[in-house]
Amino acid sequence: MSSIFVSSLFNSYSKYIEEKLENKRFTHSDILPLITKAAASGNLLVNSTGHSFENREIFSLKFGNGKTKILLWSQMHGDEPTATMALFDIFNFLNADDEFNNYREMIKEKLTLIFVPMLNPDGAERILRCNAAGIDLNRDAARLQSPESKILMELTDTILPQFAFNLHDQDYRWSVGDSNKLASISFLAPAYDVQKSVSPARADAMKLIAKLKQDFEIYLSGQIARYPDDFESRSFGDTISGKGVSTILIECGREVGNINKSYLRKINFMLLLSSFKEIAEKKYLEQNSLDNYFSIPTNGKFLFDLILRKVNFITNGRKYYSDIAINREEVYADNSRVPFFFGKIEDMGDLSPFNGLEEFDASELYFEAPKVAQKLCNNIADLNSEYLSGLLRDGFQFVKYVGDINQKSFTNLPINLISKNSTYLPAAFPASAANFNLLRNGSPFKQVVNGWLINPGETSLIKNGLIF
Ligand SMILES: [Zn+2]
């Protein structure tokens, strides 16, 4: 079930995209001109709320003068930017003059929206969860030792909102319940005590979430989940919920094949604008039981990027089989705003309770440890694609490189390099880099190179190799 309003947002979204925010690793200096732009129309009132640890200014933007107040903040974890991008799309939407004018007028009259985009600019600068003091703001709601935490608590206590939206990105390996589906969006109406009591305000948050779940099911095909609701007295959601505010946590999950999560950014845009409409019109109150909230599956076990099932091993004369779970982690090194991927063996053994986004039955294949090409290479140009495909076909995942390497951590080549002074000895074990062969009749049938499962010699899937 969906509403006409939601589908019209879906169809019109491209008009409002803030094109300046394309790479998710933007910083405070990237959003400053966008805040100025948002304020220029006079529809959004910008206020300085204070400064971060490293003196970056944190702003609030206000829209409307209605009785019902809504406070929203994004990116209290510096490395969780999706909702910030969506907020700037929303500012463009609120400033536009088009077929949604009736909506804007209604919101302006009935609601007061107060947005705080990027509450943790110092964390965004470093692509880190915590602030510049190393403190996780979402564990600082009781002690309030960080300037950013004080800003948020002060705003809450002066505004006294009816609703609060706490906007995050979640660990992208959560699944929907026990399924092999990724949790793309997880909601929570946070508990405010260990008994997980349900006050009228918390019930309202649950009803709104239940309504959103109904309306957004078709856009997220079964990938909506509920975040665990264990009480955490140090977190803002739980603390603000305890002040009688209907609090809604929205956690944005992973988007396969798109690290900038453009689709989930659009979904965030739609979710928030729909929430405003629901709150203004009080439609969500038609949810007459909380069952629709509690029936949303909770976030489940971690998913892995790849699970190889029942790989045969012969080690020290012993024959056994083991599953191998691999993740390809996004790594930002040397202050780069563009990641490389580190393919890592996460776990081995009986992994039958877990799911892989990609699964491969290796029960007919034999494990072969990673192999290093013995011929030394001192010129990158020698590593042409024909030569590398040949090495990979022969089951090699590593080349010893004796020339100078500018890059420290990774190479755009589809093979790993071992640099001249390195003592690295490739091995395949939990926590190590994922490189090995899968043999059939003694020769490579499949190969894992930096976490990607390929037919030997086939380089197109491998985004990067690593340098050891
Ligand atoms: Zn977070």
Image: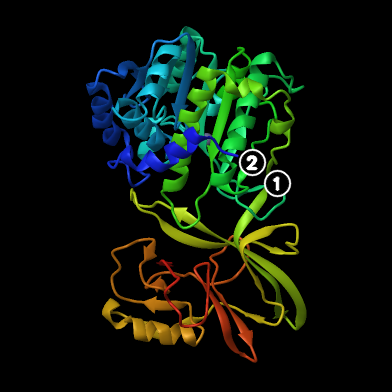
Which residue lies under the disc numbered 2?
225
Helix, strand or loop at label 1? It is: loop
Q: Residues within 10 Å of mark 2 (few under 14, many from 20)?
A: many
Q: Is residue 80 visible?
A: no
Label 2 or label 1, whichever comes before in sequence order: 1
Q: Quadrant of the N terminus?
A: top right
Q: What amino acid is labelled 1 in the image?
A: Gly
Q: Which of the 4 image quarters holds residue 324?
A: bottom right
Which residue lies under the disc numbered 1?
177
Q: Residues within 10 Å of mark 1 (few under 14, many from 20)?
A: many
Helix, strand or loop at label 2? It is: strand
Which labelled disc corresponds to residue 460?
none
On screen, residue 170 above or below 283:
below
Q: Residue at x 48, y 86 (%)?
A: 393
Q: Quadrant of the C terminus?
A: bottom left
- Does the beta carbon at disc 2 come under 8 Å from ligand 1? no
Q: Which of the 4 image quarters holds residue 36?
A: top left
- Where does residue 430 sit, x and y in percent of width and height? 63, 62
Q: Residue at x 51, y 13 (%)?
A: 161
Q: Is residue 323 left or right of residue 435?
A: right
Q: What amino acid is labelled 2 in the image?
A: Ala
